[in-house]
Image (tube, rainbow, N blue to C red):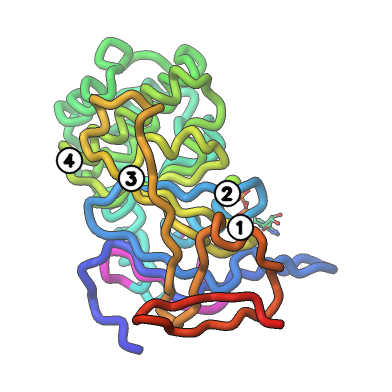
Amino acid sequence: MSFEKTGDMIVCDNVFKIYKTKDVEVVALQGLALTVERGEMMAIIGNSGSGKSTLLNLLGGLDTPSAGKVLVDGLEIEKLSQADLKRFKTVTVGFMWQNTARNLIPYLSTLDNVMLPMRLLGSIDRDYARSLLDYVGLGSKEKRKLFELSGGEQQRAAIAIALANKPPLLLADEPTGAVDSKTTADLLKLFKRISVELGTTIVIVTHDRFVSSFVDRVTSMCDGRVGSEFIRRHYDLLDIPFQEISHEEYGVLDRSGRLQLPQSFTEGINRGSRVKITVEDGKAVITPAE
Ligand code: ADP
Ligand code: MG
């Protein structure tokens, strides 16, 4: 299979990540396949330990896969030179860490924090940093430091920092993990605005199912693999009460030809067992084998 620069922002194919410690090996990702289109805003939802942070670290160029391919913005991260990797991390991706406090340097003001990624590129644009803080609703708080901001404000600052170098991709690890549901809704509306107005591709990983109401596509993650997908039927998100937003569940056929069935479909089928696939009237029919 060739991996020429594609139109997709993210392509993961058969990705494995194995952590080796002194006496155990943990297979955190096992044959993961994922494609994210440019401009998409999507969420990956899975329980703790399902491999979400591991995946995001690979996408952000912070770690490399044990096997398989990870392409971001047409680049195979593993093959980048040190200089290109540094550029990738400062220019291509904006990253929000799971640990909220890690996003802001505590002794710097919010404005200085936003200018920090610019400093890494050697071109500081104070006016743009200020406009970003305005954009995320922190215009009046540019002098505040980490401990002078609420949890939601810290996350808004983290978003401004992640956007400082105008990256085409924003990766957010549990961005609403430490805030209440009202703040969660406000933050997700901000992500949506960024997606629509700036055209940024946004991938959010979370254990919080509430997040799914705010995104176009949800992929479930379990045991280091992505499962079925839910695609939203309504498009004018900001005007619709969450209760009315519905997602349609789809199975996924990955690049290696593996089919992940929708969860609702597999209820009643003994998983891990053989199934029989037949084609009847042009439709695939799956039945448990005798
Ligand atoms: P999630 O973010 O979904 O909670 P993680 O990606 O953090 O999941 O972890 C997936 C699995 O990999 C877990 O079993 C976790 O204990 C293990 N793991 C994560 N990071 C490391 C590491 N640096 N060393 C060893 N095991 C790890
Ligand atoms: Mg995690």
Which structural element holds mark 3? Answer: strand
Identify whether 223 is placed above or below 94.
below
Disc 4 marks which residue?
198
Who's the residue at 23% across and 57% down the image?
38
Q: Which residue is mark 2?
A: 46
Give the mark toward the camera: 1 or 3: 3
Disc 3 from disc 2: Cα separation: 18 Å
Label 4 sits on what residue type?
Leu
**Residue identified by numbered label 1:** 222
**CA gap, disc 1 and disc 3:** 21 Å
Is the CB–ligand 1 distance for label 2 below 8 Å? Answer: yes
Can see residue 83? no
**Residue on which disc 3 sits:** 232
Task: For marks 4 and 2, give the one nearer the viewer.
Answer: 2
Q: Are marks 1 and 3 in contact (CB under 8 Å)?
A: no
Q: CA distance from mark 4 to mark 2?
A: 27 Å
Spatial CA span between label 4 and label 1 = 31 Å
Amino acid marked by disc 3? Arg
> Residue, x 35% and y 50% (percent of image)?
231
| Magenta residues (range) | 62-75
The Cα atoms of the two marked residues, 4 and 3, are separated by 21 Å
Q: Residue at x 16, y 37 (%)?
A: 197
Task: Determine crowd level at label 3: few under 14, some 14-19, many 20+ residues with C-alpha closer than 10 A.
Answer: some
Give the crowd class for mark 2: few <14, some 14-19, many >=20 residues within 10 Å.
many
The answer to which quarter of the image holds residue 271 is bottom right
Which mark is in front, 4 or 1?
A: 1
Choose the circle earlier in sequence order: 1 or 2: 2
Three-letter code for the amino acid on which mark 1 is drawn = Cys
